[in-house]
Amino acid sequence: QEFRSMTAAYKPEDLTNYICVQVGDFLVRYVSKFPDPTARVEELAQAEAYYNAVIERQTDLVGDAELGLANALSFSKDSAKQAKAAELYTKVSANPDPAVSGPALVGLTKLHLRTGDSASAIQTTTKYLRNKQNQRDRMDMMLMQGEAYVAANDTKNALLAYMNLFNQHKGKVLYSARACQAIMEIFWKRNNPAKGDRLQKGFQNSDRWTAWNTGQLYVDLIRRSGVEGKLTPEERDEFNKVVSAVHNYGTDPAVMKEDKANKEFKRNLQSSKKK
């Protein structure tokens, strides 16, 4: 409320570049919390004015202002403003400093996903993830890469993207739970049947059993490790979505029949080794 009062009392030309960028950033963060940020036209216009004041002066913090302006413009429904946002993000992402270019690639990826440009989102996430110095938003970008591949109907690479995140960061439940949900959904939707003979090499379980089992193993791991009791409310919400999916998938008769066959095969195999 104090910031909003200040925007009415102080014009951008009366403030330093630092304060202008800070006020603009606050307004963009404020807008981003709404279910439909594009509807917050007044606040977005105010943010644009503060950023533009810094850019027009061409003294210091111009890059920060350009990134902020791109963030504000990216929420617009106006295609011209979206195009301008993409142009600014691309300009800032060329900066050799990952601390500057990284957030620009993140913003550009979000814009591509919002506008349905999955091919470009795949390119920006790949560029970000290839640079090992980009760490701050790495897990978010891994999630968005998976989302981009799903949107592009590239199931194989979508699974690889989500599995990379899932396998590398199981302890980061906010992210691993989301990746687990995505993996389960992809397998369930693809629904390939079991392939081969359990007695032979190369046997593959069905996608739907794999979906259920992936979630079941994850839930068991989080509970056994003691992590469940330490989850934040947001993490718990995501974890409970996995628990719910495991329960729902586990009610499928075909999945339970396959699981029973897997367990019987394992028991018989163990018994034969003891003889």
Image (tube, rainbow, N blue to C red):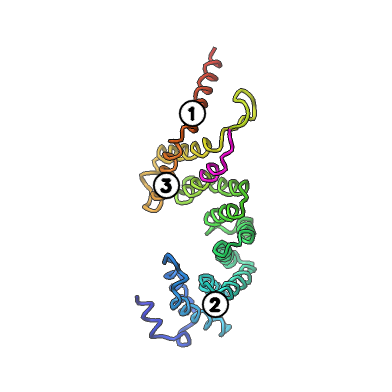
Between marks 1 and 3, how big is the CA–CA gap? 24 Å
Q: Reading the chain from its start, which is encountered first: label 1 or label 3? A: 3
Residue 134 location, quadrant: bottom right
The label on residue 241 is 3
Are there few (<14), some (14-19), or many (20+) residues within 10 Å of tag 3?
A: some
Q: Reading the chain from its start, which is encountered first: label 2 or label 1? A: 2
Amino acid at dot 3:
Lys
User: Residue 78: horizontal and vertical position, in percent?
Assistant: 54, 74
Between marks 2 and 3, how big is the CA–CA gap? 42 Å
Amino acid at dot 1:
Lys
User: Residue 251: horizontal and vertical position, in percent?
Assistant: 43, 36
Amino acid at dot 2:
Leu
| Position of 197 relative to 238 (above/below) | above
Are there few (<14), some (14-19), or many (20+) residues within 10 Å of tag 1?
A: few
| Position of 213 relative to 129 (above/below) | above
| Position of 177 relative to 121 (above/below) | above
Query: Mark 2 sits on what residue?
Result: 61
Query: Mark 1 sits on what residue?
Result: 257
Point out the stretch of residues depicted in magenta. 184-193
Tell me the chief SS of the magenta region: helix
Tell me the SS state at disc 1: helix
The front one of 35 and 165 is 35
Residue at (37, 47) in percent of width and height: 230
The front one of 197 and 268 is 197
Residue 55 counted in the magenta span: no
Q: Nearer the viewer, mark 1 or mark 3?
A: 1
| Quadrant housing the C terminus | top right
Between marks 2 and 1, how big is the CA–CA gap? 63 Å
User: Residue 202: horizontal and vertical position, in percent?
Assistant: 64, 30
Are there few (<14), some (14-19), or many (20+) residues within 10 Å of tag 2?
A: some
